[in-house]
Image (spheres, helix red, strand yellow):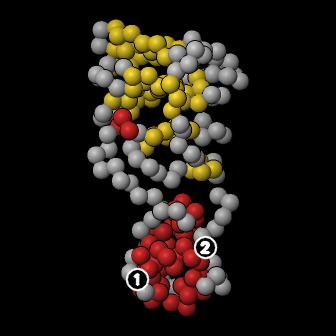
Amino acid sequence: MNQYVSASTIKTLREKKKMTQAQLAEILCVSDKTISKWETAKGLPDITMLEDLAGALGISVTELLTGECVFNNNKSSNMLRSLVYVCPICGNIISAAGQAAISCCGLNLPVLEVENCDSGHEICFEKIETDIYVTIDHPMTKEHYISFLAYVTTDRFETLKLYPEGDAHGRFALRGHGILYAYCNRHGLFSKKV
């Protein structure tokens, strides 16, 4: 994170919770003068207090630090509407059923944009008994490879991690119609309907 909690963020969030400075101070076991200093940028909360401050204001520490609150309007949580995030540093794969503030290795991660398959990223599949076998004719070198495959249905998001110098194929239990995803470390996320 390259920023710290701002005075206006603390004040705005406290007022949204309809709390006085004294009420917030009582929850955090500090004086109301301390809260006033934070809200007028004459002081900052100690880093050890961020988790308690975020909890008192009803948000995550990441939201507190960025000043951006995330609201999940997706009440049905249909997994077909999942969003995917990938850390460019460690390769961590994160899926979310709705909009989220995701960070990894100190970076705020953007939602991956899904593209239709092209000639270099064609996702092929065949149904074999109770499974679906997925293949991609793609280089699998240390510099250019398919990082993961995923099979998403209305109630599941299954991921299969692939590694450089391995094969770009995988098998999933067939669960009906859904979407197949393949993530290329150089070209992004591709999808195909099952």
Q: Is residue 114 above or below residue 141?
A: below
What residue do we see at 62% from left, 28% from top?
A: 187
Residue 181, given in percent of the width and then of the height, sits at 47, 26
Tell me if 53 is positioned left or right of 133 in this view.
right
Residue 164: mark in rendering: none
Question: Mark 1 or 2 closer to N-term?
Answer: 2
Kindly identify the amino acid type of the residue bearing the numbered disc 2.
Ser
What whole-number distance in Å separates the C-alpha atoms at marks 1 and 2? 18 Å
Q: Quadrant of the N terminus?
A: bottom right
Q: Residues within 10 Å of mark 1 (few under 14, many from 20)?
A: some
Q: Quadrant of the C terminus?
A: top left
Determine the residue located farthest toward the right in the rendered image.
143
| Closer to us: 29 or 6 | 6
Tell me if 110 is positioned left or right of 18 in this view.
right
- Residue 157, quarter of the rendered image: top left
Tell me if 50 is positioned left or right of 22 in this view.
right
Badge 1 vs badge 2, beta-carbon distance below 8 Å? no
Residue 110 visible here: yes
Kindly identify the amino acid type of the residue bearing the numbered disc 1.
Met
Q: Secondary structure at mark 1?
A: loop
What residue do we see at 49% from left, 17% from top?
A: 123
Residue 38, given in percent of the width and then of the height, sits at 59, 82
Residue 19: mark in rendering: 1
Q: Which residue is mark 2?
A: 6
Circle count? 2
Residue 167 visible here: no
Q: Secondary structure at mark 2?
A: loop
| Closer to us: 121 or 33 | 121
